[in-house]
């Protein structure tokens, strides 16, 4: 991480100059903004009319509509569209084959998060669906003695647990 300000409070101008936006990045940001505006207009075309594609049969959005059900694909296409616009504008994307390559690089960077998040999500889901009793913290001292003594199926053990 670059340090722009040192401990004494002096600003390091050379570090700031090294991080200025280049002409290619500026062109990419401008084209990405234009792509965002096009996507936003298309989204409004599906939302604003009472017969829009993103409305439900009653003409609303809640409790369920294609907009609420399709929020994940809508966000995916938004970021893909805007990111592709940035890549084309900054000359990083030269052919249509570059887009999947950059998308795979982004997934590769977040793979370690997925390795932790997916099993954690499964455990949370399965534990929430299981009808196991929950532990009562107010009875923790008594229960910890019982667990240390390894008393199983004890009638006093049932006082530690409450139905969820």
Image (tube, rainbow, N blue to C red):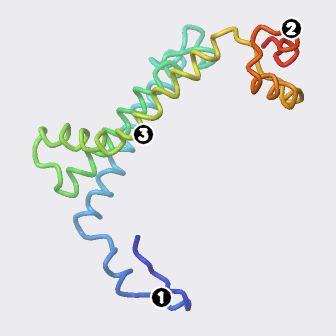
Circles 2 and 1: CB atoms closer than 8 Å: no
Residue closer to the observer: 89 or 108: 108
Indicate which disc, 2 or 3, sits on the residue closer to the N terminus. Answer: 3
Which quarter of the image is occupied by the C terminus? top right
- Percent x, y for residue 42? 39, 32
Q: Is residue 80 left or right of residue 155?
A: left
At 59% from the left and 19% from the top, the residue drawn is 61
Circles 3 and 1: CB atoms closer than 8 Å: no
Quadrant of the rendered structure where residue 65 is? top right
Residue closer to the observer: 104 or 139: 139
At 36% from the left and 51% from the top, the residue drawn is 33
Dot 2 corresponds to which residue? 155
Dot 3 corresponds to which residue? 113
Q: Nearer the viewer, mark 2 or mark 3?
A: 2
| Secondary element at tag 3 | helix
In the depicted structure, whether residue 122 falls above or below residue 15: above
How far, Cα to Cα, is label 2 from label 3? Answer: 43 Å
How far, Cα to Cα, is label 3 from label 1? Answer: 35 Å
Quadrant of the rendered structure where residue 19 is? bottom left
């Amino acid at each position: 991480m670059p340090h722009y300000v040192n401990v004494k409070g002096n600003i390091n101008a050379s570090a700031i100059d090294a991080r200025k936006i280049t002409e290619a990045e500026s062109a990419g940001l401008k084209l990405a903004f234009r792509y965002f505006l096009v996507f936003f207009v298309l989204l409004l075309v599906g939302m604003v009319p009472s017969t829009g594609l993103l409305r439900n049969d009653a003409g609303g959005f809640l409790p369920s509509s294609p907009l609420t059900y399709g929020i994940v694909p809508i966000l995916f296409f938004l970021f893909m569209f805007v990111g592709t616009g940035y890549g084309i504008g900054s000359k990083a994307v030269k052919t249509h084959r570059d887009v999947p390559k950059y998308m795979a690089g982004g997934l590769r960077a977040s793979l370690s998060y997925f390795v932790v998040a997916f099993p954690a999500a499964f455990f949370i889901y399965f534990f929430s669906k299981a009808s196991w009793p929950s532990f009562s913290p107010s009875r923790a001292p008594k229960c910890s003695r019982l667990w240390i003594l390894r008393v199983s199926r004890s009638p006093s053990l049932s006082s530690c647990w409450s139905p969820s």
